[in-house]
Image: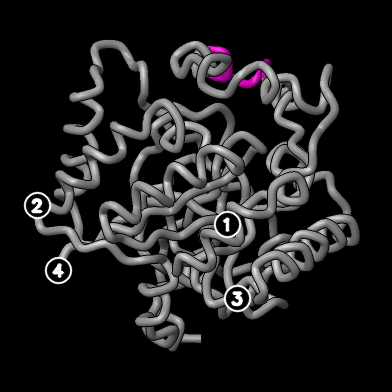
Amino acid sequence: MPTLCVKIDVDTLSGHREGVPALLRLFDRLELRASFFFSLGPDNSGKALRRIFRPGFLAKMRRTKAVSTYGWRTVLSGTLLPAPLIVPSAPEPLRDAVTSGHDCGVHAWDHVAWQDTLLSTSPVRLREDFDRALELFARVAGREAQSCAAPGWQTSAESLMMQERYRFAYCSDVRTGEPFLPQVGTAVLRTPQMPTTLPTLDEIYGAPGLSEEGVIDLYLDHLSRGNLHIHTVHAEMEGGAHLPLLEELLRRARDRGFVFCTLGDVAATLDRRTLPVYPVVQRPIEGRAGTVSMPWRSPRRAGEF
C-alpha cells in the first residue's frame, strides 16, 4: 500500500507559534498523524543572509517571496533584531503536538548555526548545543526525544556519530532514496536514516511556468513513483500562506490510495539486518542553495558486515 509520511521542520519562532497550531488543526481535520522536528533555541534567521553568495540563494529568496512569507521580524532576527528563544517563548505548540499523538523530535538548538557552521563547529560545542535542545525538549514534552532531523539536511561524520550515541529510533538527515544505515569510515551505524524523497515547496514554488495547480501535479507525479514517500514541509510556509496548497495535496494523495504514517511508524517496521548501507555525501540539489546530505549508492546490506 503506498505510504506518505509528512515531516514538518520548525525553524523559526513564527513557524513554531503560528504555523504549528495551524498544521495541527489541519491534521486533525484530515485525521492523520505527522512527524514534527522542533528548533528549540534562538531564532537567528536573519543570519541566513550570510548565504547571499551561494549560487541560487537570491533566486530562491525572490521565488518564494521570502519577506512576505516569513515576515520582517523573522528575516531580521539575530541581526537588527534580538534572536528570541523559540520554545521558551511559546512552549505550548510543542506540548500540543506531543499530546495530540504526533511523532515529535529535535531539529536543533540553533537552526542557522547548525546549517551554516556545522563543519567548523567543534565536537564539544556541537554536543553541548544538542544536549541543550534535548534537555529542553524533554522538559516541555514530558518525555525524551526519540528522533532528530538535521537542519538543512547538513551532516558531518561528527554529527552522525554524535547522534548514534543517543540510540534514537531513527534520524531524518538526508535527501533521496530509501531508508538505510549510514556508514562513517568503516563503521556502520545502527540508527536508520529516513530520507526526504520529495522536493520541498521552497525548491519549486515560483519556478517559471509552474502554477499552484502545477505544483500539486508535480508532487502527484513524484508520488506515482515508489511506495514510500517522505514529504518535508516547513511550518513557516505550509503552516502559513501555503496551508491550502498542502491540504489540497494531502486530500488528493489520499484519494489516490495513499495512507499516512509517521516516520516513527515506518522506522518501527524496519529490519536493520536487511537495510542497505551507504556512506553519506554532500551534493547539490535543484532549487536549493548549497549542498545537502544524501546517500552515496553503492549498497551493501547490514548483514554483510
Image x and y of residue 45, in percent: 70, 30
Disc 3 to disc 2, C-alpha distance:
33 Å
Position of 163 compared to 229: left or right? Answer: right
Which numbered disc, 1 or 4, marks the residue that appears first in the sequence? 4
**Badge 1, how many Cα within 10 Å: few under 14, some, many 20+?**
many
265 or 126, nearer to the observer: 265
Position of 114 compared to 202: left or right? Answer: right
Q: Magenta span covers which residues?
A: 52-58
Report if residue 277 lies within the magenta region. Answer: no
Image x and y of residue 205, in percent: 36, 23
> Which dot, 2 or 1, sits closer to the camera?
2
Which numbered disc, 3 or 2, marks the residue that appears first in the sequence? 3
Which numbered disc, 4 or 2, marks the residue that appears first in the sequence? 4
Q: Is residue 79 above or below residue 107?
A: above
**Residue at point 60%, 43% (across, down):** 16
Disc 1 to disc 3, C-alpha distance:
11 Å
Q: Is residue 202 above or below residue 302?
A: above
Disc 2 to disc 1, C-alpha distance:
28 Å
Which numbered disc, 4 or 3, marks the residue that appears first in the sequence? 4
SS label for mark 1: loop
Which label sits on residue 1? Answer: 4
State the residue position of label 3.
168
Disc 1 to disc 4, C-alpha distance:
26 Å
Q: Quadrant of residue 113?
A: top right
State the residue position of label 1.
149
> Which dot, 3 or 2, sits closer to the camera?
2
Position of 69 compared to 241: left or right? Answer: right
**Badge 4, how many Cα within 10 Å: few under 14, some, many 20+?**
few
Q: Quadrant of residue 78?
A: top right
